Amino acid sequence: MDNGGFCNNNYHSGSSDDELVDISDVTVNFSEDVPPLDLDYSAGGCKADWRPSNSPKLIDLLDDTVPGIGTYEDFNTIDWVREKSKDRDRHREITNKSKHSTVALLFSISDAFSGWLLMLLIGLMSGALAGGIDIAAHWMTDLKEGVCLNGFWFNHEHCCWASNETTFQERDKCPQWKTWAELMVGVSEGSVNVLNHFMYVSWALLFAFLAVILVRAFAPYACGSGIPEIKTILSGFIIRGYLGKWTLIIKTITLVLAVSSGLSLGKEGPLVHVACCCANILCHFFTKYRRNEAKRREVLSAASAVGVSVAFGAPIGGVLFSLEEVSYYFPLKTLWRSFFAALVAAFTLRSINPFGNSRLVLFYVEFHTPWHLLELIPFVLLGIFGGLWGNTRLGHYPVIEVLVVTLLTALLAFPIEYTRMSSSELISELFNDCGLLDSSKLCDYSGNSGGTSGSVNATAANGLGARLAGPGLYTAMWQLALALVFKMLITVATFGIKVPSGLFIPSIAVGAIAGRLLGVGMEQLAVHNHERKIFRGWCSPGADCITPGLYAMVGAAACLGGVTRMTVSLVVIMFELTGGLEYIVPLMAATMTSKWVADALSRESIYEAHIRLNGYPFLEAKEEFRHKTLATDVMRPRQSDPPLSVLTQSGMSVEEVERLIADTTYSGFPVVISQQSQRLVGFVLRRDLVISLENARRHQEGVVSVSAVLFTECDPPASPSAPPAVKLHNILDLSPFTVTVHTPMEIVVDIFRKLGLRQCLVIQNGRLLGIITKKDILKHMAQMANRDPESILFN
Amino acid sequence: MDNGGFCNNNYHSGSSDDELVDISDVTVNFSEDVPPLDLDYSAGGCKADWRPSNSPKLIDLLDDTVPGIGTYEDFNTIDWVREKSKDRDRHREITNKSKHSTVALLFSISDAFSGWLLMLLIGLMSGALAGGIDIAAHWMTDLKEGVCLNGFWFNHEHCCWASNETTFQERDKCPQWKTWAELMVGVSEGSVNVLNHFMYVSWALLFAFLAVILVRAFAPYACGSGIPEIKTILSGFIIRGYLGKWTLIIKTITLVLAVSSGLSLGKEGPLVHVACCCANILCHFFTKYRRNEAKRREVLSAASAVGVSVAFGAPIGGVLFSLEEVSYYFPLKTLWRSFFAALVAAFTLRSINPFGNSRLVLFYVEFHTPWHLLELIPFVLLGIFGGLWGNTRLGHYPVIEVLVVTLLTALLAFPIEYTRMSSSELISELFNDCGLLDSSKLCDYSGNSGGTSGSVNATAANGLGARLAGPGLYTAMWQLALALVFKMLITVATFGIKVPSGLFIPSIAVGAIAGRLLGVGMEQLAVHNHERKIFRGWCSPGADCITPGLYAMVGAAACLGGVTRMTVSLVVIMFELTGGLEYIVPLMAATMTSKWVADALSRESIYEAHIRLNGYPFLEAKEEFRHKTLATDVMRPRQSDPPLSVLTQSGMSVEEVERLIADTTYSGFPVVISQQSQRLVGFVLRRDLVISLENARRHQEGVVSVSAVLFTECDPPASPSAPPAVKLHNILDLSPFTVTVHTPMEIVVDIFRKLGLRQCLVIQNGRLLGIITKKDILKHMAQMANRDPESILFN
C-alpha cells in the first residue's frame, strides 16, 4: 500500500470546503440534516476532524473574505457546478439564519422574491427602452424626408394628426409637414425630387457616420446583432464589458441611428442585446445575482426572451426563442420568470404605444379564409427558398465600409417605393389581404378599379373578375421583383458591418416579398384556370381564391427559419406577430422544409457560424458527438509532453508551488497524495492559488519560501523550528469530476455539456493520468470535423 | 505500490466493451477517427492489447448475440448513458457501412428518416383514434337520452341533420329522435320525465359497469389518467405492459364508456396515455426504437405532445406540455419531431371532424373587447381560487366504487341543466360572449328579452340597459352556483376511481363556472355603479362593459394551473383552445397567482403526488436538493453493514462469483483490482453477469466451478492444467461514473438527474468505498423531507 500522504482517510471532513462556507453554520446544518448515522471511519491519522463539529476551527487567515477567490478572469469559462454550489450554500445560510431572527426572516423572504422583482425591473426597463427606440427611429426616419413646422420633434404621422385639415384618406398629407425641398426657396419644380433624394441620402450618410463613429470610439462591443456573443456568454463564457452600461448606451443610440439611416437591418437582435445589458446592469443591485455567474446567466436567459418580446410584441415566442436558440441552461424556474418578464416588457411597450395602434400584435392580419391542401406545394417551395436564403454567405464582407453600404442603400432604395419605405411598413403591406377600400397598388385588381380595366369579360361575369390583376398590380409586381433582388443583395452586404444590426426584419422582408410574388402568381393562375380540375373549388364567386398575404407570411417564416434554424419558436413568433392561429400547418410546412434544406447545405445557423469564426469556446448542444474516441485520446499530457503538473497535498514548499505557477500557464492543478502514488485528492484553481499565496505572503506572519504548503486539514508531523505552514485546504476542491481513461468521448462531451464543466480529470484504477478541459474538447471536435483545432481561441 | 491485479495498465484497450460492439468495426472506426497520436503506454503487463487493432480477436463465446444482455427487468430503472451509447454505436456502424455499399447507404437514409416516418404514423394513428373516441362518446352520450329512428347509429345531432323538417332555431328537435319514454307505449304524461331519468341513470350505470369490469378483467393499467406513470416511464423506469396493445384497446373502449356514462372526468389524460400506447406499439416496427429504451422515450415524449394536441386541438400547447410537465429528456430534435407529430395528429383529427365545426379550435371565442387594468383584481382572485382548487385532496377516495359515483352523478346531475350537459358543451357555453341572437339563459339580459323586463329605467335609457340582468340570468346564476358545488364534490370523488379518467376538463369546467359567476357579478356591479369613479369608462353605450366569457376563460386557466402547476404551456393551450391571443395578460396573471398559491400550500402537483403515493423512483427535476449532506452520508455500505460486495478482475472462480450472486440482491457489482487495494476497474450488472455465466456453463466447453472468471482482456499466468477461464471482459463497463466521498449530495443529485444515471461509485483517493444508486438518493431525499424512506418501492 502506498502511504505518501498524511490523514488520507479523513473523507468525512464535512463540507466541500472550496465553497467558502462559514463552518459554524455548517455545524448547525449538520445537526439538522444528517440522519442518525454514527460512523467512525477512524482509519486515518487525523481522526479528530472527520466532522467539523468536532474539529477546532482552524486558525486560518485565508477565510472567505480574500478578495478575488472564486471569481474568473476575462475570456474564461465559468464552472457551472461550482457557481451553483455557491448559490445553494448562500441559500442554505439565509434559510438557517431566518429561523433565528425576524429581520433575517424578512431578508430571506425579500431574497426569495428578489428574482421576481428583478424580472419586473428588466421588463419595465427593456419595454421602456424599446418604446423609446421605436419612437426615436420613427422620427429620425421621417426626418430624412422632411420636417414638421408645428415642432421639429413631431414625426410625419404625429404632425398630421395634430393638423385638423386631414381626412382619413390622405392621412399622411398635411400642410404642416414639409419636405426639405419645399422648405427651400427658389427650388424649381423639376429639381424637387432630386433635391429630396439628395437630402435623403445626406441624412442617411450622416446617421450612418455617427453610428459607426460612436461604436468605434466608445463601445466596440455594440456592433452587430450580439446574439452569437450572448449565446456564448450564456453557455458560461466571460466577456467583460459586453453587457456593460457603455455598451447599453451606445448600442441604444447607434441602433436608432442605424435603423434611421435606412440600412437593411433590423432591431430585434440588438434589442436582445439591449435587454441583456439592462438585465446585467440591474443584476448589480441584487447580491444574489451580482456575485454568482450562474444565477446571472439565468437572468440573462430571461432577458433574451424579453428582447424578442419587445421586438415583435411576442412574449411566448420570445420565451421559446430563448429556450430553443439562445439559452444553455434553462431550468423550469427560468421559464416562468422569463415569461413573466417578457409579459411585463410587452405590456410596458404597449402602454408606450409607439406604433399608435395599441395592439400587441405587430403585423395583424385580418384574413381567416381557409387554404387548400394543394397549396402546400407552393408553401414547400417557399420553404426551399428560405432554406437557400439561409445559406447565402451572409456576413462575408465585414470590411465593406458602412458609408459605402449606406450610400448604395440610400441611392438605390429611393426610386422604388417598396425599398424606400421602412421594412416594417413593407412587411405590413405585404402581409395584408386586399380589402375593398384598400388603396395599395398591391390591391389593384380589375374588380376594384373599374376605370382601368375596360373589358368586363366572362370571368368577371361569374364573380371572379374581382381577382383579376389590374395594371397597378402588374407594376407593383415588377417593383416587388426588383425590390427582392435589391433587398437580398443589400442585406448580404449589410450584415457584418460595424453598426448594431439584426437579421430578423430583413429576412422577413425578403421572404415576404418572395411569398407575395408567388402568392399573386398562384392567384392569377387559379383565377385564369379556375375551370381546370385541380383548381376547381378554389375560387367561389364573391370570395377570394387565394390569400396572397398568407404566402407572404409563409415566405417570411421560411426565410427567417433558414437563417436562424428555429422551428417551434419561429412558428409561435409568426402567430403572435400576425394573430393568424389558423395557419399553423402552412407555416410549419414551410419552416420544416426550410430547416431541412438549410441543414442539408450547412449544419450551422448564422449564429453558430459567427461563434465559430470568432473562436469562442461554445459547446453546441444540438449536435451529438459521433466519433468513437476515448478520453485518453483527448486528455493532456500527450505521450510526447512532459508529465502532468500536479501539486502534492503536503510536502511542497511555497517556493516550489510558486515556481510551478510561474513555469506553467494551466488554469488549475490537480492535488495528489504524492508524486509516487498519483492518487487524486482534489483540484485547485490557479487564480485561487495565486491569490491565496500572495495573501499569505503579505498577511500571514513568518511565511517564507521554504514554508510548507498544506492542502490537508490536519498538521503533518513537522519539526518545531520549521516556519509556519500555509494552509490552503479551503481553496481545494475535494470533489473534482473524474472519468476513466476508457470513457468514450461522446459521454465526456455529454457530461461537459450537461453539467457545464470546465475541466475533468482522467484516472485509471485510482491513479491520476491526465486532464481534459473544455478547450481540449472543442479542439478535438474541430479536428474531428477537419477544421483547424487552433481556431478555438479562448479557455 | 500495490499490485494486486494483472495488466492493470491496459487503459488503452479501445472501446468500452460493455456496449457490445463488434470489434472488427471498431477497428475501422479507429483508423478514421483517431488523430495521429502514437502513444504507447506500455507500462502494464499486457502490452499487446492496448489497441484492438493490434490485439488478436478474443476467442470468446460471449459475443453480442447472447440474448438478454443489455436489457432490463420489469420495475427497474434504465441507464440513460448506456442506452445513448448503444444508439451512437448503432449509428456509427450504419454510417460506416453506408460508405461501402449502395444498399447500406439506402438503409442508412431510411434509418435517418425512420424517426420522421414514425412521427407521421403516430400522428395519424392517434388522430384517428381520438376522432373515433370523440364520435363514439358523442353517440353513446346521446344514447342515454334516446335513440334515432332512422338508424340507431346516428347521434342526436346527426339524426336531426338527416331530417329535413328542422329549422336552424330548433336544431335539436326533430321527430326522428325519440327519447326512451316516447318509445314506450302507454306512458302517462306525468311519468315521462321520471322514466327518462331512470333510463338515463340505467345507461350510465351500464356504461360505468362495463368500463370497470373491462379494466379489471383485461388491463388494470388502463385506469386513471396515466400521466403520472408516463412521467415515471419517461424518466427511465420500466413498467412492462403499461403501454402495450391490451392497455391501448381496453383504455380506448373504457374511455368511451366512462365519458359516456357522464362521470365528471375528461379524456385528455387518457388520450395522452392512448397516444403513448400507439407510439410504443409503432416503435416495434423500427429496430432503432424497439431495441433502445432511450430512443423509445424520445418518441414517447413526442407522443405525449400528440395526446394533448388531439385532446384540445392544441399542437403547440401539447409540445410545451410535454416539455414543461411530462418529459425528462427532451433534446431539441425531439422538440421538432414532437411538433411535427402533434401537427399531423391535429390535422388528422380535423379531417375526421368529430365536432362538425371543422375548426382546430375547440372552444373558439369571438370576443375581442379590451379589458381594464382594474379587472386584474378579479383575475387574481380567480387565480387564488384555482390555487386552492389545486390543493383539494383530489384522489383521496380511491376505493369508493365506480358504480356509487356514477349513480350519484347520474341522479344528481340530471335535474340541473348545466350538470346534465357534457362538460365540453358547458365550457363552450360559459366561454361564449352573448351575441344578440343568443338564446342561452346565460344571455338573458333585460335589453335582449324585452318581454320579461317591463320597466326600462334610466340606465337603459343611456344604452346600458342591454347589460342589466334579466330573470333568466338570475336563474342561470343560481343553477351555475349549484353546479359549481356539485362539480367540485363529484370531481373530487371521481378522480382516483378505477376507470380511465382525466382531470383537465373537470378542472376547466369548475374554473369556468366560478369565472362566469364572478364575471357576471362584476358586470352587474359595473352596470349598476357605472357613475362611480372606478367604473367610469368601463361601460360605453352600445358596447359591453365586461366580458363574462373572459372571466370563465381565466377561471378555467387558473383551476387547471392549480392542479397541474403548468404555466407557459397552460397559457398556450388556452390560446389554442380559444383563439384569444389578446388576453395573454389576464391569463398569465391568473395562472401565476394560481401556481404561487398552490405551491405555497403544497409543492407537489397532482401528478407528483400520485408518483410519490405509488412509490415510483422519480427524481424530480423541478426542485433543487437543498441539504448539505455528502456522498458519504448516502452511500452503501453504512458503517454497520458488511463491506461492499465486489468482484476482482481476476482471481475469482465461477463458484465464488455464483455464490456472491446468490448471497446478494444488488443489481450490479464493482470490479476491483484486488480485495486488498480496492482500486476500481469497472462495473458489471447483475443481470448481464447471471446471463453470461449461465451461457458459459451451458455452451463453453470445460467450464467448471473452479474455472477462473476474468474481467481482463489478457490471460493471467495460469497453470496449463487449469480449466479454461470464463472471460467476461465484454460485459464490464470500463467507465463507471465515480464521485469522491466529499462530493456534496446536491451535486450528486444533479449528476443523476442530468445524466440519467442508475448508480454511481464512491471513491476516495483512488480507493473504492461505496456505491450510490438512484433508490438510495430517493430514500435519502424522502428522509430529508421527513417522509418514510421505505415509500420508495422500486429500483
Image (spheres, coloured by chain):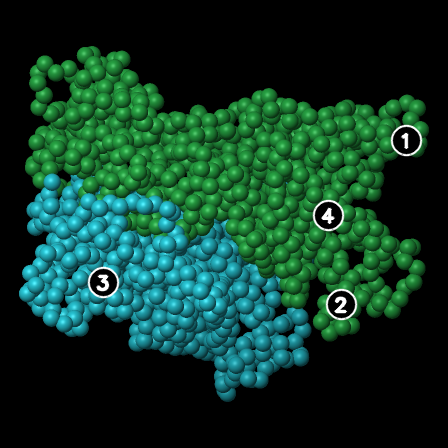
Chain colours: A green, B cyan
**Element type at marker 3?**
loop
The answer, for residue A254, to whether it is visible in the render is yes
Assess disc 2: are there few (<14), some (14-19) or many (≥20) residues with their C-alpha within 10 Å of its C-alpha. few
Quick one: B359 or A766, which is closer to the camera? A766
Q: Nearer the viewer, mark 1 or mark 3?
A: 3
Q: Are marks 1 and 3 on the same chain?
A: no
Name the residue rendered at 41%, 41% in the picture: A779
The answer to which of marks 2 and 1 sits earlier in the sequence is 1
Name the residue rendered at 16%, 16% in the picture: A724
Instruction: State the separation of the CA atoms marked 2 and 1.
Output: 50 Å
Name the residue rendered at 62%, 47% in the picture: A392
Q: Amino acid at mark 2?
A: Ser
Q: Quadrant of the N terminus of chain A?
A: top left
Instruction: State the separation of the CA atoms marked 1 and 3.
Output: 91 Å
Image: A665 above or below B52 = above
Q: Are marks 4 and 3 on the same chain?
A: no
Image position, residue A736 (x, y; %): 26, 37
Residue position for label 2: A540
Q: Quadrant of the C terminus of chain A?
A: top left
Residue position for label 1: A191
Image: A610 above or below A63 = below
Q: Amino acid at mark 3?
A: Leu
Residue position for label 3: B58
Subunit ID for the residue under disc 2 = A
Q: Nearer the viewer, mark 4 or mark 3?
A: 3
Quick one: B446 or B763, which is closer to the camera? B763
Q: Nearer the viewer, mark 3 or mark 2?
A: 3
**Element type at marker 2?**
loop
Q: Are marks 1 and 4 on the same chain?
A: yes
Subunit ID for the residue under disc 3 = B
